[in-house]
Amino acid sequence: MTEPSAITGYTLHRILGRGNTSLVRLATNSQGQLVAVKIPHPETLAVQDAAERFGNEVRLTLQLRHPHLVRAYGGTPFGPHAFLAVTYYPKGALNEQLADLPDRTLPLKQALRLLADVASALTYLHHQGAVHQDVKTQNVYVTEEGRAALGDLGNTYFVAQGGKTSGSPFYMAPEVYQGELTSSASDVYSLGVMMYELLGGDRPFNGNSYEELMVAHMTRFAPSLTLVNPLVPRAVGRLAELALAKRPGDRPSADQIRRALLSALGEVPEDEVYEEDLKPEAEVARPMGRHAPAQVRAAAPPVNTEPAEEPEKSGRWNPFRRRK
Ligand SMILES: Nc1ncnc2c1ncn2[C@@H]1O[C@H](COP(=O)(O)OP(=O)(O)OP(=O)(O)O)[C@@H](O)[C@H]1O
């Protein structure tokens, strides 16, 4: 099987990138807009779990709308013509941009702004009762104006429906290493790691193996962020440290972090108001994630269950790769 060379309604152009799950191509949609089209690898479609994760990403990206979540333009969750069309970010993912900087450090204001945007996206997801499970710089995209959008909702689930735990070792909370369920607090922990990365120039915990990282996250304490970078406002540094608290209950909420970051930018943080809350209950869309009840999911096109090899079984340990 090869990736489809055509998608109805889209003119495909060059390849933008290749991830574990999909090939991403620049495309023009029927309205003439440039978009990024994610096309699952044939191996993804052939493995039920991977295909479901892609289907979950398509449905949730279409369903959840927020200025700082990657926006979907169209998609098909399952089957040989599965795809997801999203906003095209010419600068690519944040990790790629950081890698291009001489010392991996953004100007302070820019870093505070990107973090405030990600905290805002998380505030929205948590308000919806969802957990992202994969907050990391690889899943953050930046616009030409320097604003951030959080993407990759493949592992996102609604708490009320339950979900399969996953995470990336550099960003994973201690309780998740210990086998507990993820939660809004474990997302906040991952945001705390990103705060150190963007404001302090490095992730708080490093290691050369899964075990080393696990020990670091579970037993070590990060240095004070304001000592690492004295330019970081005290309130922001304090919240980053609290976000890395070993006990989930000791962590702040994403909204508290959002407010502190906006205050540090000299803005008066306002309450976020969501469209869904303004609509009468009957009009609010039902959650449609991968973990949605069977009767909801049954309406979706069937999953391709062809048996095949697992995607990309390289022997090398990759700390950015999700643990599933
Ligand atoms: N919206 C976009 N605009 C521009 N480039 C993009 C966009 N989405 C993805 N890319 C590029 O494609 C690469 C692969 O995308 P992504 O990491 O989302 O793939 P994936 O296979 O779906 O994810 P994963 O590897 O986590 O399973 C990114 O690193 C980035 O360079």
Image (cartoon, rainbow, N blue to C red):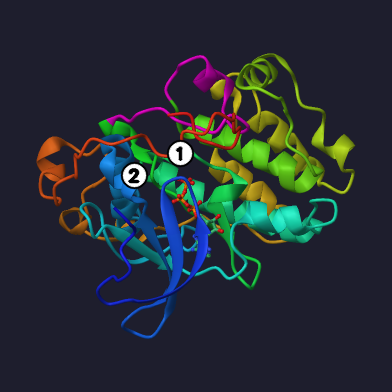
Q: Are marks 2 and 1 in contact (CB under 8 Å)?
A: yes
Q: Which residue is mark 2?
A: 43
- Residue type, label 2: Glu
Which quarter of the figure has residue 263?
bottom right
- Residue type, label 1: Glu
Q: Position of residue 9 (x, y in %)?
A: 27, 77
* Of residues 155 and 79, the one drawn nearer to the viewer in this rendering: 79
**In this rendering, is residue 235 above or below 213?**
below
**Is 163 contained in the magenta span?**
yes
Residue range of the region highlighted in magenta in the rendering: 162-181
Q: Which residue is mark 1?
A: 312
Q: Position of residue 44 (x, y in %)?
A: 34, 44
In the figure, is residue 319 to the left or right of 33?
A: right
From where the camera sits, is residue 123 visible? yes
**In this rendering, is residue 146 above or below 23?**
below
Q: Earlier in the sequence, mark 2 or mark 1?
A: 2
Q: Residue furthest front?
A: 1
